[in-house]
Amino acid sequence: MCGLVGIVGNAEVAADIYDALTMLQHRGQDAAGIMTFKDGKFLQRKGEGLVRDVFRTQHMSQLLGNFGIGHVRYPTQGSSGTALAQPFYVNSPYGIALAHNGNLTNANKLTAELFRSDLRHLNTDSDSEVLLNVFAHELQRLGKLVPEPEDIFSAVEAVHTRCEGGYAAVAMIADHGVVAFRDPNGIRPLVIGIRQGKHGGDEYMVASESVALDVLGFKLLGDVAPGEGVYINPNGELIRRQCAKEPRLMPCIFEHVYFARPDSMMDGISVYKTRMRQGERLARKILRERPDHDIDVVIPIPDTSRVAGQSLAHELGVKFREGFMKNRYIGRTFIMPGQDERRKSVRQKLNPVPLEFKDKTVLLVDDSIVRGTTCGQIIQMARDSGARKVYFASAAPPVRYPNVYGIDMPAASELIAHGREVQEICELIGADWMVYQDLEDLFECSREGNEGIDGFESSVFDGEYSAGTIDQAYLRSIEAARSEGSALRLAVAQDGGVVGLHNDN
């Protein structure tokens, strides 16, 4: 679940890309990278860690050029390590760099094709490198010394034909500007904005979320449509083209539940309003199931459940209180690699306010329950702080199935709701009572913001995969490759010997 940005301006863009990446930091904390283009050369800086840790003043001063792309990484497909930091680069044709958010579900098949038919070498196990090489091959196959917009869109169309899964990508072609595209189902998000440049003329930006546009003064033009290709040449001319035959808008609903910032607009839907409606719907369910509830106070688990918690408390007519203080210097535990790391970080991240718990019946609200690591510890913290009873509410339905489109939920065995009923889950996490959002209610919370939505990618809740050929054999293969303790996942991190395009000193 990575963050992307691409900018074509009429002045140096590296500082703007850096600022945009900081606004997208919540989407990935494993690695960060920026690549720009100036005087016939690609210039880059990338590495493991947060944006603020990867880039220093001396690095930024070297990233020259009026167009470039950036990436923050959250590892799903493939190993982790510096060599896996994006953007990736190939020198032929033209020189192309690419950053990617999502997963290709047919990456293994494409890898074989790239080697046997396209005669291309892949140096990592990242499906982002696969996507880059497919795009590069389709451009090379056209054999143009100077590609026209139609050639670029033809290559994007071929990518959509060959690649399956959920993906959004932003690419940079040497001398020719920035290209962005989104999978034909619109699973992964991508928006585009415009602003007036300091020296006149239009400047354009594509990003994973609209908040990245806001901070830099770009006006949101809208979303890159499912299957659409967007090309911005170095002169700041924007050209858009539909590159898929049967596109449909099926955005990932987990963006609305957890990943996106509440101040983002996605596919015409306000994430903030969606989460408000999630709380309202959940409150109505509680009133149906427990009309005589004894809840004294609603306490959110910061930060992603705060909006839903506020509207839930208002609908129930009970007090809303901040019962946990968050340490802002601890990252999002969900995207941390490894259960041990997540367990350790929960108590580092949250500290209870005992006065809000003592002798009270508390309803804790979270955006979702995935592995159960966090909520079990938080419930115990509430009891240790003196709570008389602890109830638990999830603004999302039970997460029962693996995600294959860019969220690190590869193994069904790691999901607390897989194969379990609600009462079993309640006992496992240590709650006195719990309630989940109904799936249809969750759909309505999002659909209310955009009636033109064709549907939602909701496979983690219902097991219905909207893109690619997803069968049990495939699910077993990704579980083996991506589950915790996998030898493949650890190999690069331990060795670090993968050859890549590396930073200058």
Image (cartoon, helix red, strand yellow):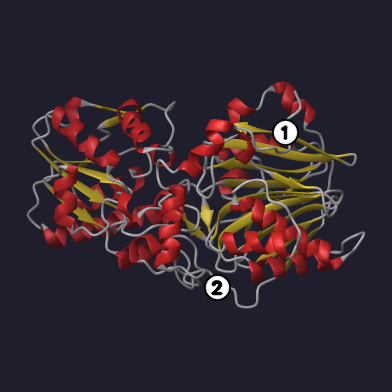
- The amino acid type, in three-letter code, at marker 2 is Arg
**10 Å neighbourhood of mark 1: few (<14), some, or many (≥20)?**
few
Q: Which mark is residue 502?
A: 1
Identified at 47% across, 48% down, the residue is: 260
Residue under pointer 2: 248
Spatial separation of the CA atoms under disc 1 and disc 2: 38 Å
Residue 51 in view of the camera: yes
| Callout 1–callout 2 Cβ contact below 8 Å | no
Q: Position of residue 76 (x, y in %)?
A: 50, 48
Query: Position of 10 compared to 401: left or right?
Result: right
Q: Position of residue 48 (x, y in %)?
A: 58, 32
Identified at 56% across, 39% down, the residue is: 23
State the image quarter where residue 42 is shown: top right
**10 Å neighbourhood of mark 2: few (<14), some, or many (≥20)?**
some
Identified at 67% across, 60% down, the residue is: 181
State the image quarter where residue 336 is shown: top left
Mark 1 or mark 2, which is nearer to you? 1
Q: Residue furthest bottom?
A: 246
Q: Which mark is residue 122?
A: none
Q: Please report whichever mark, 1 or 2, sits nearer to the chain's N-terminal start.
A: 2
Judged from the image, the secondary structure of the residue bearing numbered disc 2 is loop
Figure check: 119 above or below 58: below
Judged from the image, the secondary structure of the residue bearing numbered disc 1 is loop
Query: Position of 305 compared to 88: left or right?
Result: left
Figure check: 57 above or below 333: above
- The amino acid type, in three-letter code, at marker 1 is His
- Towards the viewer: 13 or 195: 13
The mark tally for this picture is 2
Q: Position of residue 19 (x, y in %)?
A: 64, 35
Query: Position of 263 compared to 295: left or right?
Result: right
State the image quarter where residue 145 is shown: bottom right
